[in-house]
Image (tube, helix red, strand yellow):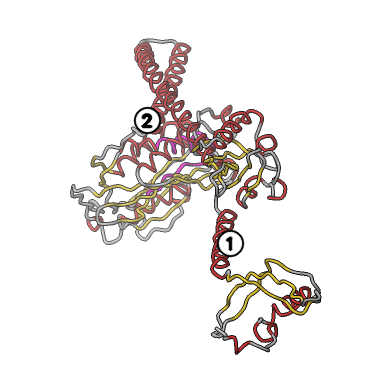
Amino acid sequence: GFGREEVFGKDLVEVYITEEYRSTVRLVLEDALRGIETTSFEFPLFTKDRNRVDVLLNATTRRNVTGKPVGVLGVGQDITKRKEVEEEKMRVAQELRTFIDTANAPIFGIDASGLVNEWNNKAAEITGFGREEVLGKDLVEVYISADFRMTVREVFENALEGKGAANFEFPLYTKDNRRVEVLLNATTRRDVTGAIVGVIGVGQDITEKRRLMEQEALLLQAQAANDAKSQFLATMSHEMRTPLNVIMGMNQLVMDTELTAEQRKFTEQIKTSAESLLFLINDILDLTKIEAGKLELVSIDFDLRQVMEEAVDSVASKALQKGLEICSYLKPTIHTQVVGDPDRLRQIFLNLLSNSIKFTDVGQVYILVEPEEATATHETFRFKVYDSGIGISEEGQKKLFSRFSQVDSSTTRIYGGTGLGLAISKQFSELMDGSMGVQSDVGSGSLFWFTAVFRKSAIPQEVQFPPFDIRSAGPKVEAVVVTKNETLRNSVVRYLEALQVVATCVADIDGAAKLPKTDGVYRVLVACPSVEAMVKG
């Protein structure tokens, strides 16, 4: 942009060369004045309108007729476009390098001799080997296990012949000798002329995926084994129940005949053992149905109070034999007609009550039923079974609801049992959209509780309580409750209070006789003799 007249006589370096290049250009020109010529020297010039022009310069010494240097002749070439292309290539190459280094996949390359010439950050991360450690090393010989070397080498050799490989799996071993599973795509690497110069590999760490696949395969095997076990147990239980029913029936026929005391003792032992075995078989059948997901609850109308009382009646004789008090309470005014599965509810009651009686030697077993939550269509009840038995340690409570598990081996030896009852009861409770738990301390008894959700019954239930007009007995009805057991005493008092009866509690008849009376007479006397006295009597 500068004319000839504009530049003649001006200092080339000071006027037309940018400050950062002045010393370098001045040195080149001074060398040329000393006869030291320079070729292919690059430097920028700035045009009149301040645009940068990249120049490739050959600086030649200019001499007079005597050969003395008198100046410098520069022959230049405008390489601005070429520089722009080169810079663009460098930018693209740098972006590609950044992409390779930061890619979330291991990328490595080898030359035609199999030596590593590419190793990105991810490859370094999963193997533990840094870039400097692997460059120039034989990838197959150093980093591939002996059993895979031949296969991996074949893949790379094919790629060097122009035959790429996709989805090839092989293991790499890390610096700390861990095995890493890699899924590899091997691609032929070529130079600008198209000649093959190596192989570039883009991998994927599939170690976790492979582990999950192996776990899934093991899980399927375990499920198949569990299904086979469940089928076997179900078949065996059915096969055992048929002859067992025959044994129980024939034994009952024998018990109905005239027997000596010793013979009756033997037949009663047969009956007890057969019943225990039948309970076990039924538990196993329930367990197999639960595991197979084939246990379905029925949905019929029933009275929850009746189910509770029937369960208590079923185990009352066992409690009596051990000298234990057994009592229950469900508020008389509560609507107890619901829709659900009474048999499974009864089974939970019987399991919990039987356990409480089994592990209680002195004292009582008490069942309490309370409404917990109600919606327009459903009602939740909480059931509690208290006992004054041996109690359970905190560590033992963790094992309670596991199948075939008891608190410790001594429990099985002393009290018997299989450890199935509580596990099945918990499953039943969960099938009823409830839950089950325990609160206990060693030596202080236990509280087992569970919840269950029932659909409200469409059958109208008239709860008339009291069931008769209590005022017909007088303006004020008083009663005395005679029993030693505090829990039983409290239950009876709660029922009497619901009847609008004023109740006074004493421990024995002598205590009742000493009570003051307004007219000398109690209209109601409720005597609850202790189980201990009944057994002795």
Q: Spatial distance from mark 1 to mark 2, Cα to Cα?
A: 71 Å
Q: Looking at numbered disc 2 in the image, what kind of residue is underneath it?
A: Lys
Residue 200 coordinates in the image, percent (x, y): 57, 44
Percent x, y of residue 53: 58, 75
Residue 399, located in which quarter of the rendered image?
Answer: top right
Q: Residue at x 58, y 69 (%)?
A: 79
In the picture of the structure, the residue carrying the numbered disc 1 is 90
Residue 355 colored in magenta in the image = yes
The span picked out in magenta is 349-369
For label 2, the residue is 289
Q: Nearer the viewer, residue 467 or 382?
A: 382
Tell which of 309 and 185 is nearer to you: 185
Q: Quadrant of the N terminus?
A: bottom right
* Circle 2: element type: helix
**Left or right: where 413 falls relative to 491:** right
Q: For numbered disc 1, what is the local secondary structure?
A: helix
Choose mark 1 or mark 2, whichever is in front.
1
User: Which residue is at 46% across, 40% downward?
Assistant: 325
Q: Looking at the picture, does residue 164 appear above or below residue 510?
A: above
Q: Amino acid at mark 1?
A: Met
Closer to the chain start, of discs 1 and 2, is 1
Q: Is residue 54 left or right of residue 451?
A: right
